[in-house]
Image (spheres, rainbow, N blue to C red):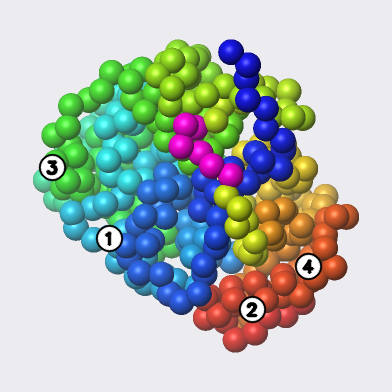
C-alpha cells in the first residue's frame, strides 16, 4: 500500500483545523456551551502559575473564540457536577472529567513511586506519617491547602515548598486527593476525590493501562490532526516505551493512518477524521502554553518558527523577551510580542515586537488590532508600545 504524502502546507492546515482555527469567528462573547465544546476539542488547557499577562489557561479560548467573559468560564469550570478537573495531563492541566479513568494508571504509578518528581519517593504507599495525617485531616475536616498547615520549608530556590505542600502534592499526584478549586495567589485546595468528582465518573471501571494510553493517544491524534509519534506522546506526556504498542494498535484499527509529510524526517500519522480546512484566514495571539506551539520541535516542523520560552533565561540573555506570544496570521506564525498587563496603569504593555522575515506588509496593523482586542478582553484602557 502506497503511503499518502502531504505537503507542509497541507499538514499545517490540518493541524490548525484540528485545533479550532478553521473559519475563525471571534465576534461576540462565546457562551458556556461554545467554551465547553472548544475545551473538549482541544482536550485540555495547560495551567501555569506565571501571571505577568493573565493565567495561561484562559488564553487558548481567547485565541479561538475572541473576547469571551472570563467570569463565565470560571462558572463553567466550577459548576457542579464538575465537567472539568485538574490533574497532570500535559503538565498541570484542566481536563474534561471523562478523562479521569484514562489517567488512573498515572496515579497508580505515583503510588508506587514511578513517574513522579525526585523527592516524592518517601511518600510511596502513603507510608510517610505526614502524608497519611494530612489525608486523614482532609477526610475529617474537609478541603485543605498547604498554607492551612504550619510547616517548615524542606526545599530552597524557586520551588521552595513546605513539607506539607510536598505531601499534599504527592497525594494529588497519586489520586488520593483531588483539586477542588484554587484560591488567593492561585493556591491549590485539596479534598477527597469523592467530594470533588462526579460519582458517575469515579464509578467507571479502571481501564487496562494499555487501553487507557491508547485512548489518550487517540485523543492526541484527533486534537493534532497530523502528528509524529513524539507529538502524540507529548500531548499527555506518555513515555516512549508506553506509547509504542498503543500507537501500533491505533494504526491497526484505522484510527490513525501512516503518512509522509514532506520535510519531516519522522514517520507521521493522520487521524482518520482529520481534514485540511480551507478557511485558515484570521489572526490570533497564542499563549506560550497553547497546544499549537507548546511542543517546540513540532512548531518548527509545521511553521518554520523557532520558539523558546525565556522566562527562566537571565534577562541579559533573552532574545525576544520574558513572556512572548507568537502571532498567528492566515495560517502562519509571522511575529512574536513580549506582553505584560500593567494593571496599575490600566495598560497592555508591548515590551518588544519581532516580525518574521516573511511577515506580510500588513502584519503590524493586524497585530495592533489583535492587541487592542486583547486589551479590551483584559479590561485594560490602552495599548502601549
Judge by depth and name the residue closer to the eye, 9 or 189: 9
Instruction: Please give the residue where the numbered disc 3 appears in the rendered image.
Output: 199
The tag earlier along the polypeptide, 2 or 3, is 3
| Displayed quadrant of residue 340 | bottom right
Left or right of 151 on screen, residue 54: right
Asked if marks 4 and 2 touch (Cβ < 8 Å), the reply is no
The tag earlier along the polypeptide, 3 or 4, is 3
Instruction: Please give the residue where the numbered disc 1 appears in the rendered image.
Output: 78
Q: Secondary structure at mark 1?
A: helix
What residue occupies the far right of the structure in this picture? 357
- Cα separation, mark 4 vs mark 2, equals 14 Å
Instruction: Please give the residue where the numbered disc 4 appears in the rendered image.
Output: 363
Of badges 1 and 2, nearer the viewer stands 2
- Cα separation, mark 2 vs mark 3, equals 44 Å
Residue 267 versus residue 45 in the image, above or below: above
Q: Which span is picked out in magenta?
A: 271-276
- Cα separation, mark 3 vs mark 4, equals 50 Å
| Residue found at x 71% / y 43% | 9
Amino acid at each position: 500500500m502506497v503511503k499518502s504524502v502531504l505537503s507542509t502546507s497541507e499538514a499545517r492546515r490540518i493541524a490548525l483545523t484540528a485545533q479550532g482555527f478553521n473559519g475563525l469567528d471571534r465576534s461576540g462573547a462565546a457562551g458556556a456551551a461554545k467554551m465547553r465544546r472548544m475545551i473538549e476539542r482541544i482536550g485540555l488547557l495547560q495551567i501555569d502559575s506565571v501571571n505577568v499577562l493573565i493565567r495561561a489557561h484562559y488564553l487558548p479560548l481567547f485565541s479561538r473564540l475572541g473576547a469571551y467573559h472570563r467570569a463565565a468560564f470560571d462558572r463553567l469550570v466550577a459548576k457542579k457536577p464538575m465537567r472539568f478537573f485538574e490533574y497532570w495531563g500535559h503538565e498541570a492541566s484542566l481536563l474534561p472529567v471523562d478523562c479521569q479513568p484514562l489517567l488512573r494508571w498515572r496515579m497508580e504509578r505515583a503510588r508506587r513511586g514511578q513517574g513522579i518528581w525526585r523527592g516524592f519517593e518517601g511518600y510511596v504507599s502513603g507510608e510517610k506519617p505526614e502524608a497519611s495525617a494530612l489525608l486523614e485531616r482532609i477526610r475529617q475536616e474537609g478541603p485543605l491547602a498547604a498554607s492551612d498547615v504550619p510547616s517548615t520549608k524542606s526545599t530552597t530556590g524557586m520551588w521552595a515548598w513546605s513539607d506539607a505542600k510536598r505531601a499534599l502534592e504527592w497525594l494529588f499526584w497519586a489520586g488520593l486527593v483531588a483539586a477542588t478549586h484554587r484560591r488567593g495567589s492561585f493556591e491549590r485546595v485539596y479534598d477527597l476525590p469523592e467530594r470533588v468528582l462526579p460519582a458517575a465518573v469515579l464509578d467507571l471501571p479502571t481501564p487496562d493501562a494499555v487501553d487507557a494510553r491508547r485512548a489518550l493517544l487517540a485523543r492526541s491524534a484527533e486534537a493534532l490532526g497530523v502528528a509524529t509519534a513524539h507529538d502524540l506522546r507529548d500531548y499527555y506526556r506518555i513515555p516512549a516505551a508506553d506509547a509504542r504498542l498503543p500507537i501500533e494498535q491505533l494504526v491497526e484499527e484505522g484510527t490513525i493512518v501512516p503518512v509522509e509529510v514532506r520535510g519531516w524526517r519522522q514517520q507521521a500519522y493522520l487521524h482518520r477524521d482529520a481534514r485540511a480546512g480551507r478557511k485558515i484566514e484570521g489572526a490570533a495571539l497564542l499563549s506560550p502554553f497553547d497546544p499549537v506551539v507548546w511542543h517546540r520541535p513540532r512548531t518548527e516542523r509545521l511553521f518554520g518558527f523557532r520558539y523558546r520560552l525565556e522566562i527562566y533565561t537571565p534577562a541579559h540573555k533573552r532574545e525576544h523577551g520574558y513572556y512572548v506570544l507568537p502571532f498567528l496570521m492566515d495560517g502562519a506564525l509571522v511575529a512574536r510580542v513580549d506582553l505584560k498587563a500593567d494593571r496599575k496603569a490600566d495598560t497592555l504593555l508591548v515590551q518588544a515586537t519581532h516580525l518574521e522575515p516573511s511577515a506580510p506588509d500588513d502584519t503590524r496593523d493586524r497585530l495592533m488590532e489583535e492587541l487592542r482586542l486583547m486589551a479590551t478582553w483584559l479590561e485594560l484602557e490602552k495599548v502601549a508600545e
